[in-house]
Image (cartoon, rainbow, N blue to C red):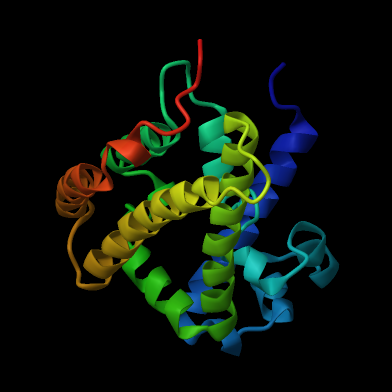
Amino acid sequence: MGEGLRERKKRQTRQRIIGVAIGLFVERGFEHVTIAEVAAAAEVSVNTVYNYFPAKEDLVLPPEEASPHRLADIVRERPPGQSAAGAVLARLRAEVRGRERQVGLTEGFGRVLEMMRAAPTLAARLDDLGRRMTDELAVVLAEETGAAEGDPLPRVAAWHIGCLHALVYAEIGRRTVAGERPDAIAAAVLELMDVAEGLLGERVLAYAVRKG
C-alpha cells in the first residue's frame, strides 16, 4: 500500500524541520540554537518540533537512523550461510559503495560532523550509541549460538565487530573533516575494510554462521 497524503505531509514536515535545524546548528553551533528558533525558521510550532523530536539531539541523530539496534538488525537479517561479521562487512561495503547518507558519504557532511564533535551532548550520545550497538549484538549472538550464560565468546565477537564498525565511521569522519571528496573517501575506506577483514581472523569471520 502506497504512502497516504497524511503520512507524506508528516514525512515532509519532519524532513523540513531536520533540514532547517541542521542548517542553523552548522551555522551557529548546536548549543547556541534553541528549539524555538528551529520552530520559527521551519514555520511550525514549538510543540510540533517536540512531537517529532522529543530531545534536541534527535534533530541531528534521529533514533530511526542512529539506532542502537543497527548491528543486531543487520545480523538478524543475514541470509543462510553468512556469518555475523560477514553480514556487517557486506552491509558496510554496500553503504560505502552507494555513498549513502547512513555512513556520512554525502557532500557537505564535513561541516555537520564538525558541529557534532563540538557539542558535548551529541558526542556523548554517539559514544553511548556505539556501546549499545555492541551490547545488543552480543545478546543476539549469544541467543543464536546457544552460548551458555557467562560465556564471554559472544561479547568478544561483538566487540570485534563493533570495533570494525566504529573504525569505518571514524575513518570516514577523519577524511571528511580533512576535506576529501566522497568518492575518494569511499575508495580509501573499502581498502581499509579489506585490511581489517584480513586481520580479524577465521575465528571471528566464521563465527555465528546462519544455518540454512
Q: Left or right: where does residue 110 sit relative to residue 139?
A: left
> In this view of the protein, which residue sits in the foreground, 30 or 139?
139
Residue 137 x %, y %? 57, 46
> In this view of the protein, which residue sits in the foreground, 88 or 111?
88
> Which residue is found at the position 64% from the left and 48% from the top?
64
> In this view of the protein, which residue sits in the foreground, 8 or 122?
122
Residue 57 x %, y %? 64, 71
Location of residue 40 with respect to 77 vertically, above or below:
below
Location of residue 101 with respect to 79 vertically, above or below:
below
Answer yes or no: is residue 139 visible: yes
Location of residue 88 with respect to 129 vertically, above or below:
above
Q: Quadrant of residue 124?
A: bottom right
Residue 14 x %, y %? 67, 53
> Which residue is found at the position 23% from the left and 49% from the top?
196
Q: Quadrant of residue 115?
A: bottom left
Residue 65 x %, y %? 57, 50
Q: Quadrant of residue 99?
A: top left
